[in-house]
Image: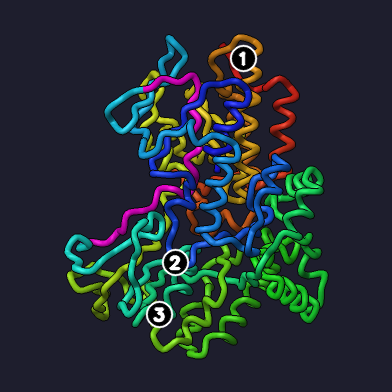
Amino acid sequence: MGGIYGAHRFSSQGLRVLGLEGASGFGGVWFHNRYPGARVDVESQVYNFLFDHDLVKSWVWSERYASQPEILEYLNHVADHLGVRQLFEFDSWVTGARWDEANHRYAVEVNGDRTVTARYLVMATGQLSKPHDPPFEGLESFRGKWVRTGDWPAEPVYVAGKRVAVIGTGSSGVQAITELAPQVESLHVFQRTPAYTVPSRNRPSGPEQAMEIADNLDAFRDELVNQVAAVRARPPAGPAADYTPAEQQRLIQERWDEGGATINFTFSDQSVNLESNEVVGEFVRDKIREIVTDPQTAEALTPRSYPIGTRRVCVSSGYYETFNRDNVTLVDVSRDRIVRITPKGIETTEDEYEFDLIVFAVGFDAFTGALNAANIVNDEGHGPTDHWVNGPATFLGLMTTGFPNLFMITGPGSPSVLANMFLANTQHIDLAADLISHMAERGYTRAEPSETAQAEWTRHANAVAEPLLRRQAESYMIQVGEDGDRYLIPYAGGFNTFVTHCNDVIASGFNGMEFK
């Protein structure tokens, strides 16, 4: 989505644009994550582009939470509506890029066999786009088929009547498990850390919602921009301690019945107060015990090692009910560790299982994986993340000192994965485009943040994360620095606050940037 909008925005202001895409088509995460059950966990009506009235009117979502095929179709529709398809080269991986200080340009290596040059290098490569390799020995010996949710094959993966294993119970795993269970002969779920999972309450959507938004688009967009996560959500109640236990349960039940991750915002203090957070967490644990009929399985599925909302809350339809099926077995990897993959299946410390198909839902090399894979270096031969030993060091999550004209869209130090990614990508691209316009008007060809501005933004980002319970939990959003401290990678001050900071920088004539 960042690449599509970026090509549109930059070309609209007269820049020559070349889009390089490693995949064979548009879609980014929605091109690669085509596993069974893949769908968005943000409401479709807000999870789309909102900058163009005609574009909004041209598309009607069929569901509250759109599925992967519909989102992929939408992104291709957007590319054609905006006329940017011809600006892209597909099957084109950036394999290297070096800054040429003498000419103020990047020499960008494509597929290892040709080079193009560019004044500006915009990395709209996503923060959850480079899947982890399966971390188990013996995989090459497996005689069945194995796949990853993060780059699911384009050709059909036949599961009917198969003995299937799913390793991982994060968001992708939860969705795949729920979808696969009714189709397969048997399903074994290998779980290391149980997730808090809430019902989606998915339902059909239609043209009435789309037209209502299109007719009030500016106000609707402003409403989202002024939210912490850039989504529509009822404001939280006050601190949990202000309510009786019965009132607490009623408020959480309302969120549970509403569906979606809104349960994260039940009480105003649940992200910083462990006692308040525990009220919500125990509510979900009670639901697991109510839904899952086998007490041992229910206990294994119950998250206890981290507060709710400090790792991603999964949104699904019928996940816990899936474990009441006769053909579904939960393997608790925290107790029965996976030793290796064997020719027949999976060997654990206590057993060996035979499978026809293994599905790896083991997450991503988040935030820096795709950026580092592009092998970008400055004129001193350093990479952009080399100096991030004690957390990310960026200016507004967009740029990092020592790498002129390099833009990291929705990068570390921006709201990134803590916000609606359509609005986050649009806002960050607009910020980069405004900076480039500022440079063009003044004859500048080189820009990078000053060390002082970067240090100030990094201190601010760390300060707003300091009181959060999220900072203490193990997750892909946390970096443990060489100094032993824990750093939250995305900006946690809220999308609304972030936009205000960015607007202030623009209004100041990009104070904090150094130009040549």
Quadrant of the frame with the C terminus: top right
Quadrant of the frame with the N terminus: top right
- Amino acid marked by disc 1: Ala
Q: Is the magenta stretch mostly helix, strand or loop?
A: loop
* Residue 469 to residue 49: above or below: below
Seen at 51% across and 51% down, the residue is 478
Residue 488 visible from this viewpoint: no
* Tag 2 near tag 3, CB within 8 Å: no
What residue is shown with label 3? 330
Q: Position of residue 408 (x, y in %)?
A: 52, 34
The stretch of residues the image draws in magenta is 116-137
Q: Does the magenta stretch include residue 133?
A: yes
Seen at 55% across and 40% down, the residue is 80
* Residue 145 to residue 218: above or below: below
Of circles 3 and 1, which is in front? 1
Q: In 3D space, how far apart are the residues under numbered discs 2 and 3 (Cα atoms)?
A: 19 Å
* Residue 189 to residue 502: above or below: below
Q: Position of residue 328 (x, y in %)?
A: 40, 82
Q: Position of residue 233 (x, y in %)?
A: 74, 59
Binning the other alpha carbons within 10 Å of mark 2 as few (below 14), some (14 to 19) or many (20 upward) gives some
From the viewer's perspective, is 138 left or right of 228?
A: left
**SS at badge 2:** loop
What residue is shown with label 2? 36
**SS at badge 3:** strand
